[in-house]
Structures are given as structure tokens and as C-alpha cells.
Amino acid sequence: MLASELLLVALLTCLTMMVLMSAWRQRKLWGKLPPGPIPLPLIGNYLQLNTKQLSDSFTKISERYGPVFTVHLGPRRIVVLCGHEAVKEALVDQAEEFSGRGGQATFDLLFKGYGVTFSNGERAKQLRRFSITTLRDFGVGKRGIEERIQEEAGFLIEAFRGTQGAFIDPTFFLSRTVSNVISSIVFGDRFDYEDKEFLSLLRMMLGSFQFTATSMGQLCEMFPSVMKHLPGPQQQAFKDLKGLEDFIAKKVEQSQRTLDPNSPRDFIDSFLIRMQEEQNNPNTEFYLKNLVLTTLNLFFAGTETVSTTLRYGFLLLMKHPDVEAKIHEEIDQVIGKNRQPKFEDRAKMPYTEAVIHEIQRFGDMIPMGLARRVTKDTKFREFFLPKGTEVFPMLGSVLRDPKFFSHPRDFHPQHFLDEKGQFKKSDAFVPFSIGKRPQSACC
């Protein structure tokens, strides 16, 4: 009995000492790192966070500690930036220091620092520069992609007509359409809407994307070394990502067998040609692993974020029939009913443009952005961030900054219209981040 009591006292003493040491270390850093809630050993600030709504938890913490604070996701120390001013200072004014990529546990298990999105340093610079140039060569960001979009929109309309007015889940109708636009650039061809492999790929992308927003997904971010060994939905997410990688690898093998160096058909061909050109360069970043994972980055990001935004946009229009009616009126006036829309119509449709922007602002698809990492010891405001410190730029807090949006928590297209009803831009419109590594497909 006495031995048990002594053991209990010893354990409580050790636990108390660990808590006190953790608090002491945190206070020692407070003069350097931004302030924040005191973490517990091993679990950090887990008990103070709602893993289902992590961004909301960060908003509440910012109300106490200010727009720049430190939080611990398990043993992982994160500096969080809230509001337009703090995010802009970091990602624009000190872009080079904040240009590193932080961790993303669900994806890191597969990518491990390869590919354009999750790489760092010279690798990230080379892959991003190549990807942007190549995508532009194939029409992205230019009118050259307009025909691809128009063609795919035609297939979507036919698919809708085929439902004969029945109730449908639009998820895969929209993702098939969006994915085929990027597929035509990355793979040089589109998929048939009923292709079973294609539908399987879309389910894998949707499943792994949605998993990152769940409580289990957030636990993976906090305790990745433990969660990757435990049973649970994270194992299916890992399996889905591996299935996507295997599909891309198969596509690359097919392209290798039919490659004509003088006539690149798509992104994969262009990368393979660059691999041949740099095969004697010992420092090249153009090799098979980076090709497969960069292509997966483009395929995934080019599909999931856009299709999810479209799906949410349709929901908002259903909930706001007055807004939908105004869009219809503008479409009828500018485009009519006998032709497809063109890129040049955009300048004549300020209300539709404002609604599209407001859908992205209000939808807030990536509220915490992708984690950043400072590339060197960095002075930020009155704080000191050691090299390698991870940073969460809270994009959602920028998109709801009351200094820029009069009704930040409401769906309000007038946020992007001036007093004359013309479209106006906003510096706080950052649905995919800002700075050197925006969250586009080539981030």
C-alpha cells in the first residue's frame, strides 16, 4: 500500500515538474516568440482547441493574444497570423523570409518534400518556375484555355440534360468537368464522364481533401508520428493518395513510350524533355519522382479546390434567389441565350464578377492556408522567429476582415461593387493566399 502511494506521489511530482518546466520554457521564449496559451507537455494546446473548427479556435485565441500568437499543435509549435495587416506584412513585405513550406501531415507521408507544392528551397523554385511557364505555354491564364473550358462546359450541359430534371448530387458532375480541363493540359486528353477509373480518382481526391478538415485530420497534424501507425480513417486517406500517385506514375510510363522530343503534347511531355536536357546535371531537380508528384499536385489542386468552390457557389445561389435573378438578367443582357460565354464578356458583367469573388470570399475554402516556414532567423514586428518556425497565415481572417468587408459574415456581393455598380477589387481578397507561394496548383 505504502509503495503504491509513494509511486503515485512520484508520478504526480514528475508531471508537475514537466508542466512547470514547459511553462518556464514558454515564458523564456515570450520575449522572443509571439505570446500564446501555455502548452502542456506532449499534447500542447490540444485541450484548448476545437479540432472540428480549428480556425474558429484560433480566432478566439487571437482575441486574447492579438493578431500574432503562438500555439502548440501537440509538440508542433506554430506562429499564427490573423487579419490582413499581419498576413500581408509576412507574405508580401517579408516574402523571402516566409517563403518556406511548412508541414501537412496527411500529404507529407506521400510527398516527403518532393513535387512543386510541398518542396522547399531550390527545388521549389525550379519546379514552380517550370510549372508556371509550361502551364502558360499550354494556355493557362490566357485565352488559349477558353476553348477547352467551352468544350467541357458543353459536355457538362449535356450531362445535366441527361438527368431529365431528376434530383442529383452535383459533386461529381462538377469535379468531372473541372478535372477534364486540367487533364487536357497535364495528360493531353480528357476522360469520358463514365470512365470508372476516372470516377475512382475523383472519389480518392474528394476523400483525402475532405479528410484534412475532420477532427481525425487535425489529430494527424498534431501527432503525425503516432497517427500514421494507428487504424482509422487516416489510413484510407493515405491509401487514396497512394492510389493517385500510382495512376500518375502509369500515365508517365505511357508518355515515356510515345514521347516525341520535338512535339510535346502536354505537361508530362514537357517535363520528360527537360529531364533529358538535364540528365548530365548532378544538381537537377528534373527527375521521375518530382515529375510524378508535381503532376499529382497539379491534377489534385486543379480539380478539388475549383470544383468544391463551384459546388458551394451553386448552394449559395439557391439560398439567395435574388442574387441568382440578377446574374440571369446580366447574362441575358450581355451573352443572350444563343452562344457560349467568352472571356471578353467578363469586363461587361460587373455583378457576375462580384458574385464570383464573393462566393470565394464567403466560401473560404482554405481558412488556414497551407503552412509556411521561415527560411532563416526572422524579426517580425517585435518578435523573433527562429529559422524553421512554422507559420499559419489565416486566410479566413483576411477574407472576413471588417476593415475591408462591411458585412464580413454575410454573403454580400456588394463587397466587390462600387457606388456606380462597377466591379472593384479588394486587397483582402486572398482565397488562395498571396506572396511568393500562393495556394494555386503551382504553389
Image (cartoon, rainbow, N blue to C red):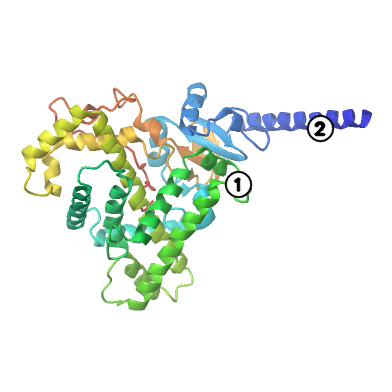
Decide which of tag 2 and tag 1 comes sooner along the chain.
Answer: 2
Residue 332 percent across, percent down from the top left: 8, 38
Residue 371, can we see it?
no
Q: At label 2, which amino acid type do we have?
A: Leu
Q: Is residue 158 left or right of residue 123?
A: left
In the picture, the disc for residue 227 is 1
Q: At label 1, which amino acid type do we have?
A: Met
Q: Is residue 15 left or right of residue 117?
A: right
Q: Nearer the viewer, residue 93 or 325?
A: 325
Residue 47, can we see it?
yes
Q: Mark 2 — residue?
A: 11
Q: Nearer the viewer, residue 58 or 182?
A: 182
Residue at image x 36%, y 68%? 271
Residue 217 percent across, percent down from the top left: 52, 42
Q: Is residue 284 left or right of residue 267?
A: right
Quarter holding the N terminus? top right
Q: Is residue 394 left or right of residue 157?
A: right
Name the element at disc 2: helix
Label 2: few (<14), some or many (≥20) within 10 Å? few
Residue at image x 39%, y 36%? 395
Residue 146 vertical position relative to residue 217 in the rendered view, above or below? below
State how far apart marks 2 and 1 are (Cα). 26 Å
Q: Nearer the viewer, mark 2 or mark 1?
A: 1
Residue 277 vertical position relative to residue 439 in the rendered view, above or below? below
